[in-house]
Amino acid sequence: VQLVESGGGLVQAGGSLRLSCAASGSTFSFNAMGWYRQAPGKQRELVAQIINGGITNAANSVKGRFTISRDNAKNTVYLQMNSLKPEDTAVYYCNAVQGSIYYWGKGTLVTVSS
């Protein structure tokens, strides 16, 4: 399984970005896909996750601003990020869960300037 993220970049506070994560390989049995982020000097944290059946959950810090979605036909998960804040600056990692196995992408950097 490979996860490849795209869509990161530099944006001003209040702006928007959309991250994409394309999965390849044995993707048919993913239980969940999602996004984590890691800011400098901080632990990696869950941003948003979508579980089979369409159930989603998100960190309180991004609720109302970020939306996760999944296109099963394309094996792709998206993260629409609106009203970005400087504190959203981090490396964003795509994640997929297959049974007890966690797969990770290499990450994409999101920088929000004030």
Image: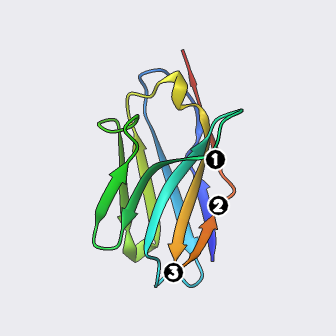
Residue depicted at x 50% and y 53%: 35
Residue 110 visible, this orientation: no
Q: Name the residue carrying label 1.
A: 108
Q: Name the residue carrying label 3.
A: 99
The answer to whether 17 is drawn above or below residue 72 in the figure is above
Residue depicted at x 53% and y 68%: 96
Q: Nearer the viewer, residue 33 or 8?
A: 33
For the N terminus, the quadrant is: bottom right
Element under label 2? loop
Element under label 1? strand
Q: At which x and y percent is residue 104?
A: 63, 63
Q: Name the residue carrying label 2.
A: 105
Residue depicted at x 47% and y 24%: 85
Mark 3 vs mark 1, foreground winner is 3
Q: At which x and y percent is residue 57?
A: 34, 53
Marks 3 and 1, how far apart in space? 25 Å
Q: How many marks?
A: 3
For the C terminus, the quadrant is: top right
Do the residues under discs 2 and 1 have CB atoms within 8 angstroms? yes
Question: Would residue 110 be found to the left or right of residue 13 on screen?
Answer: right
Residue depicted at x 40% and y 34%: 61
Q: At which x and y percent is residue 23?
A: 55, 71
The picture quadrant where one finds residue 39 is top right
Marks 3 and 2, how far apart in space? 17 Å
Q: Amino acid at mark 3?
A: Gly
Question: Would residue 8 be found to the left or right of residue 57 on screen?
Answer: right
The answer to whether 96 is drawn above or below residue 26 in the figure is above
Q: Earlier in the sequence, mark 3 or mark 1?
A: 3
Q: Earlier in the sequence, mark 3 or mark 2?
A: 3
Marks 2 and 1, how far apart in space? 9 Å
